[in-house]
Image (cartoon, rainbow, N blue to C red):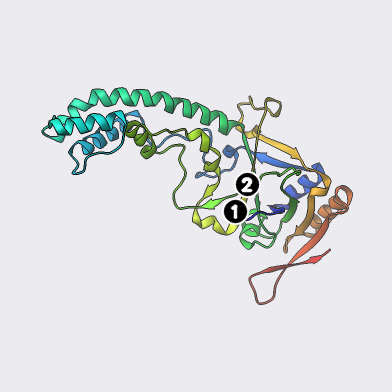
Amino acid sequence: MPEQHDTLAKYCPAPMALAIIETQTLRWSAPALFADPFELNHRTTLAFDPHSLLDSVIRAACGMIFARDVPRGTSPLSTVIRRWRDEERFGSPEEAEEALHELMARMVDQRQNAIDEMLSDWRQYTRALRICSFSTRADNLLAWQHYADCHRGAVLKFACGEHTSLPHPKPVSYNPIRPEISSLKDQLNAVLHNEPLHPQDNFESKFLSKPPTAKGEKEWRCFTEASEEDGLRDNDEQHWFIDKPFAQDELKAVYLGAFMPITDKKALLDAVKKHNPDTKVFQALAVAGKYEVEFVGV
């Protein structure tokens, strides 16, 4: 079980922090707006096409025919291949490939219907998906550098969990393998071994994985779904976001960056006083002799 948190930290440049406080909303964006070439979105395609899937299926089936070990399993293809092996039906892999082409093509065509349905579901899912990202703490130097304008921005700490506007935050995992909508290996197993496959059940998980180089961000994500009232049918990707309100008491603290300009600091302090008078405000300071920041009350 991942560690649970009752607050999450939103790192942002000063103008964004001011907009959040003045509007009392957080922006939730579609993956297409993340400006990250490694983030999956509605335009993402599969790493294989029907021809490469068919070629892989034929090669794998031939491998099963001429492998040292008898193929196991109860799938129709495994049963047929065991019979062919007993009958010594094929004398060479080349002969088998030629004979298998028509049979495998029919199986791949049947599988392609499920793949087309999956891709249609994927496009609908990713067009409607809206994500809001956070980190766990306000003293994350990497997040200050990357997301809070090199310490010129701010961190807004929000309550999260049940009965808040952030009810089900989920941690990002950091893995060297980039997620795919569905892999060639999974589709092979579905064709060859009749394994049940429904990638739609795991679409959300595709947005909870980032490369190990980003591990220090300790990112958590919250998900919601856009409706037609939110402009779901708008084809302009730049409009694929929701400014979702949060309750006044959910903003627990504001942390001002160590290099925040005086004008931005004054604007934020005025906004907090006006819209969230009970929210605590802290100034970030570099700790002498350490790569750390500390916070003092303002």
Q: How many marks?
A: 2
Is label 2 in a helix, a strand or a loop?
A: strand
Q: Position of residue 83 (x, y in %)?
A: 19, 30
Residue 164 position within the rendered picture, expressed as x and y whole percent measured from the top left: 75, 44
Q: Which residue is tagged 2?
A: 221
Q: Amino acid at mark 2?
A: Arg
Q: Disc 1 or 2, which lies upstream in sequence?
A: 1
Spatial CA span between label 1 and label 2: 13 Å
Under mark 1, the amino acid is Pro
Q: Position of residue 58 (x, y in %)?
A: 25, 32
Residue 291 location, quadrant: bottom right
Residue 28 screen position, x and y as percent: 67, 40
Q: Is residue 37 left or right of residue 160?
A: left
Using a 10 Å C-alpha cutoff, classify the residue at mark 2 as few (fewer than 14 neighbours), some (14 to 19) or many (20 or more): some
Compared to residue 278, the image places residue 164 above or below, namely above
User: Do labels 1 and 2 touch, CB within 8 Å?
Assistant: no
Q: Which residue is mark 1?
A: 2
Circle 1 crowding by C-alpha within 10 Å: few under 14, some 14–19, many from 20 = few
Identity of the residue drawn at 30% across and 22% down = 106
Q: Is residue 1 left or right of residue 112?
A: right
Which quarter of the image is occupied by the C terminus?
bottom right
What residue is shown at x 83% (from left), y 48% (from top)?
Answer: 249
Disc 1 versus disc 2: nearer the observer: 1
Q: Residue at x 74, y 53 (%)?
A: 156
Label 1 residue SS: loop
